[in-house]
Image (cartoon, rainbow, N blue to C red):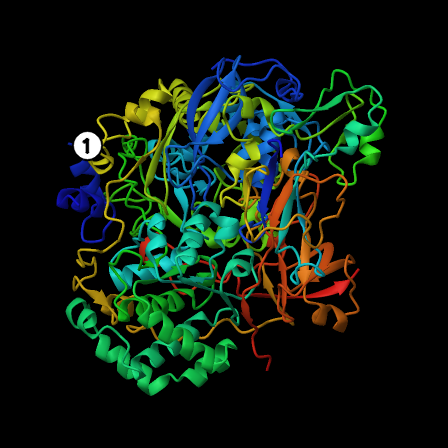
Amino acid sequence: MDQNINDQAKMPLSCSMSRRKFLNCLAAAGVLTALPGGLLKPMTASADLNFEDGYQIFRNACPRNCYDTCSIKTYVRDGVIKYIEGAPESSFTHGGLCVKGYAYTRRPYSPDRVKYPMIQDKRGSGNWRRISWDEALDIIARKFIEINEKDGSMLGLALTKYSGNFGITNYAVEGMMTSLGYTSRLVGTPCWPAGIDAQNYDLGDMWCNDPEDMVNANYIILWGANPAWNSVHTMKYIYAAQERGAKVVCIDPVFTQTAAKADLYWEVETSMDGALALGMARHILDKGLYDRDWVMQNSIGFNDFARYLRNEITVEWAAEKSGIPALQIARVAEEFATAKPATIWIGYGMQRHVNGGASVRSIDALVAMTGNVGKVGGGARYGHLYTWGFNYHALLQPRPEGSVGFLGAEGPLGDFDFSGDKVDEYSDRPMNMNKTAEEILTVDDPPVRVLWVSCKNPLSQDFDRNKMVEAFKKPELIVSVEQFFTETVELSDIVLPVTTLFEEWTVNASYWHYWLSINEQAIKPMFEARSNTEIAAALSRKMNELKPGSCTYPTEIDTKEWMIKEFNQGIYDLFQIQSWEDLRDGPVKAKMHPASWQDLEFGTPSGKYEFKSDLCAEHGHQALPEFKEGRKPYDKLRLLTPHTKFGIHSQFVNLDWMEEYNPKPFCYLNPIAARERGIKDGDMVRVFNKIGEVRLEVKLTDVVPPDVVMMYTAWFRNLDYNCQNLVDDTSSDMGAYKTGAPGVAIHGQFADVARV
Amino acid sequence: MNKQLGFFIDAKRCIGCFTCAMACKNLYHQELGVIWRYVYDLKTEVYPHRERAFYSLACNHCENPTCSNVCPVKAYYKRAKDGIVVHEQDKCIGCGNCIRSCPYGAPRHNPVLRKAEKCSFCWERIDSGLKPACVLSCPVDALELIDLSTYENPNVVQYPQGFPRYTKLNPSVRFRVAETPTIIRRKRL
């Protein structure tokens, strides 16, 4: 392994280096008038099909918030997508996609797409009228100028954007905001922030081994991760390890599809993962099975941690807390400690708790004390951003002359904030994304006058929906940039039609695997859809027409050129390509060592693995990965709202192709809990708690324990189901350090069920 | 035995993700409601945990296909070279005999054309040297193309529990059954 490449790989976002510095050192449509459904004619099996000639082939990449970030080959004929496949060049994607990915063939042609800019007479009325792009931008630009004159700043304009589209060029949205002045930003992430902070305290960054290297593990613990549904392409590596004789243990409150494929499944008490990990650590310590040499050479604070374990933790206590018998804990701890290399995949679900960060630190400690950090086939796998070293030039816009902003904010604006460390007098005003409703309702001086929503569907994804509905009454103008008429669009004034992945140029990296994919424009944008980049340029044109100098964003943009500008020598060196053009031949893998931290130079203040982190203590947590209690129940059953295999949050579930296999939502209840409530299989039930309620059909099953009710996150286009009716916005313990706001205790929720 | 292509359905590996079903739809754009391949979850009598084990099924391209036997207009034929059962929709008069007769429910009614249709085994792709869309798509290699004239695997069964047994038809499918892990339930306090 070339040492430089490894250094190159370590550059992105490691905390020893400012992000601004990192950026600097790397920096050396036509409208179709046909009916959308009509373009996708059914093919009969006897039609003159051939699979060789007559297609134009394009390279695309799935831009969804998903581990797999699949590389796609798109087959186009007569300007219409006929079918897609997974790129065979990527050993990770391996020629296939997933149930969601293959539904993309339908997506651009979906009859219920947002086709034109539209304006709603009254929020929520459903009285939409088509308007021209020029009219829409005129209304928006005049409003921007008006609030700037009223408040003396642009802080009344708030942006909420998250992971709806990870194509790198979509940072045009943040860039557009910057180019207007200092605005308000909903910062943080509902997804994985507690774990990011935890890994930063322990290791100095979040950096996982190559998932393809899981084949080298002799022992795999899948801890709160459900790859069978959420990372289908990683399953083949887990199977390969299993076939080699590796043992696969799945720890989850639910008997997931992944659990069904494991050798051993532990039905852990929800949020007691930390107790379980500490119990295992205590047993490993007692048996002397920890890696003394590794710990001595590469870590600090181990003796303090050992003392804590001896004084405070016993295997019996861990058994009581987690519900897993002490003998089991002891056995698996011994197996894990002796099966080198052994690895743990830390899922995102298990850190969505008031003690989530603490739990992740306990699991990190388990991997480190057994000497499995920095090893092929080892690692505490969570995620990484080491292949994301693009230029983000769309983001780095100057503010207009004389802009006034917010005083006293510092820190990152999110998990994917690559904007660099600002040293301006002013900053944008941060608002906690995980308390979006509360923030919109309470922020003042100035209040949120205009809300801009892009790559996000707050009404389906954010918390305490009833409060969110109230919050959406407050702003004077709400603009949504969307492909579909989501619940958020329903409560907006203006909707702007945005492109799908096939209709724009961009580039995509993964936070899990090491591949990089180009995303070519395969078809002309349908109807009047425009990419976020084009929207920003058009808005800038309009702003400068009405008030010259009010927006610094370029007014003429070629989206392909803008995609090319994202590349730099650092990316070329890391992937060993000459030019972005090489990606047109297929995805390319980063030339990084498959084991993260293999040089054992950690990004922590001490440069070593920190069992004891002073930084963590400075930030108001425990210095050691000590046990932290979960949230106290506020209702009879625990409510779990994990991901469905048929969607990514509110995406895909609404497509008619997906409705074939997933026509309606269900909640899942154990027969014991059902008997107590007089509920039978297939009954319509009410799931309710202090926040709100949901009515849906129940399925009785032992995949959930008797004290749990489960339903999936989803948005069905013709049903009013929404699991966020039941989830409040209680914060998780960590997240503020690296993502600007604490996470949210999505699984620290409770509810009861009754027959309707 | 003549060459007979078939599907190997590995329920031990299958994660019920429906990728195969959607890959088929992505290629053929069937009318809504017309499904060639579906992923059936096994009843708890067959696999003890609900919706955790599956059989991905389409047309079984039987050795002795009922659809073909009952078709009054010879819209079905079985390819001599590989045993694929082909339905020629141009000839189909939509009488519904095949739809009513196939015990595996493979032929479906196309409400727009008012004709039958079913899984073609992607024979055009086979003839181009490519795998069927569903087989290519499977992320865990749980669905494979096999030639029954040469296929030998002691771990497979033709009629696993939950799959209807029609020996006269001799469906060209083989299965490996799903397994359960060791399960440690929480101690309830």
A117 or A483: nearer the viewer: A483
| Label 1 sits on residue | A569
Report which quarter residue A706 is drawn in: bottom right
Residue A557 in the image: above or below residue B166:
above
In which quadrant of the rendered image does the N terminus of chain A lie? top left
Return the x and y of residue A118 as percentages of the image width and height. 59, 26
Report which quarter residue A107 is drawn in: top right
Q: Amino acid at mark 1?
A: Gln
Return the x and y of residue B172 as percentages of the image width and height. 65, 39
Q: Residue at the spot x=15%, y=43% of the render? A: A2
Q: Residue at the spot x=49%, y=79% of the render? A: A321
How many numbered callouts?
Answer: 1
Q: Residue furthest bottom?
A: A311
Q: Is residue A270 left or right of residue A197?
A: right
For mark 1, name the chain: A
Return the x and y of residue B11 as percentages of the image width and height. 59, 51
Residue A545 in the image: above or below residue A604:
above
Q: Is residue A321 left or right of residue A8?
A: right
A686 or A301: nearer the viewer: A301
In which quadrant of the rendered image does the C terminus of chain A lie? bottom right
Q: Is residue B4 left or right of residue A174?
A: right
Return the x and y of residue A73 as percentages of the image width and height. 45, 27
A662 or A420: nearer the viewer: A662
Q: Is residue A731 visible?
A: no
Q: Is residue B144 visible?
A: yes
Q: Provide the secondary structure element on which disc 1 rests.
A: helix
